[in-house]
């Protein structure tokens, strides 16, 4: 499994993922939708990607807003796996 990335490496990688933010030992992004049903459809898509990649984000749902937090818990920080999943998640909405 990949190693934890330094804050410098994360910052450089997030240039390609501009809507994601580095927060301590995680990266996160909040997505906004028109309504609850669209938010849940998105979460279902994220769940499919997470299962396919065997890498699971923390998910918070607040009606039409979905906050995703990615970190490789077993490594204690952000790894390439998190960046890869963030990129795939972005394809669901961008």
Image (tube, grey):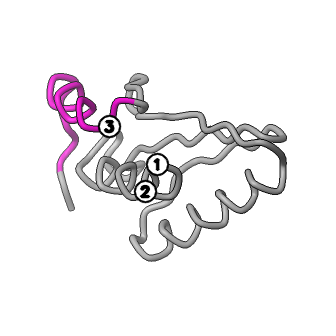
Element under disc 2: loop
Q: Position of residue 25 (x, y in %)?
A: 38, 30
Mark closer to the chain start, 2 or 3:
3
Please check the rendered image and state whether residue 16 is part of the magenta-colored stretch, yes or no: yes
Q: Is residue 8 left or right of residue 90?
A: left
User: Looking at the rendering, in which quadrant would you find the N terminus?
Assistant: bottom left
Asked which quadrant contains residue 77, the reply is top left
Q: Which residue is mark 1?
A: 94
94, 85: nearer the viewer: 94
Tell me what residue is drawn at x 40 percent, y 23 percent: 24
Look at the numbered discs 2 and 3 and tell me whether their residues touch, using CB distance below 8 Å. no
Mark 3 is surrounded, within 10 Å at the Cα level, by few (under 14), some (14 to 19) or many (20 or more) other residues, namely some
| Range shown magenta | 3-18
42, 69: nearer the viewer: 42
Q: Position of residue 45 (x, y in %)?
A: 59, 66
Tell me what residue is drawn at x 83 percent, y 45 percent: 35
53 up-or-down from 12: above or below: below
Asked which quadrant contains residue 2, the reply is bottom left
Mark closer to the chain start, 1 or 3:
3
Q: Which residue is mark 2?
A: 91
Q: Is residue 28 left or right of residue 7?
A: right
* Label ID, residue 17: 3
């Amino acid at each position: 499994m990949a190693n934890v990335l330094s804050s410098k490496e994360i910052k450089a990688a997030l240039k390609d993922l501009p809507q994601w933010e580095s927060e301590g030992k995680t990266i996160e992004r909040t997505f906004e939708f028109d309504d609850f049903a669209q938010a849940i459809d998105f979460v279902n898509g994220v769940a499919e990607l997470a299962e396919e990649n065997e890498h699971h984000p923390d998910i918070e749902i607040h009606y039409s807003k979905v906050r995703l937090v990615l970190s490789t818990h077993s490594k204690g920080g952000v790894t390439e796996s998190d960046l890869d999943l963030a990129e795939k998640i972005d394809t669901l909405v961008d």
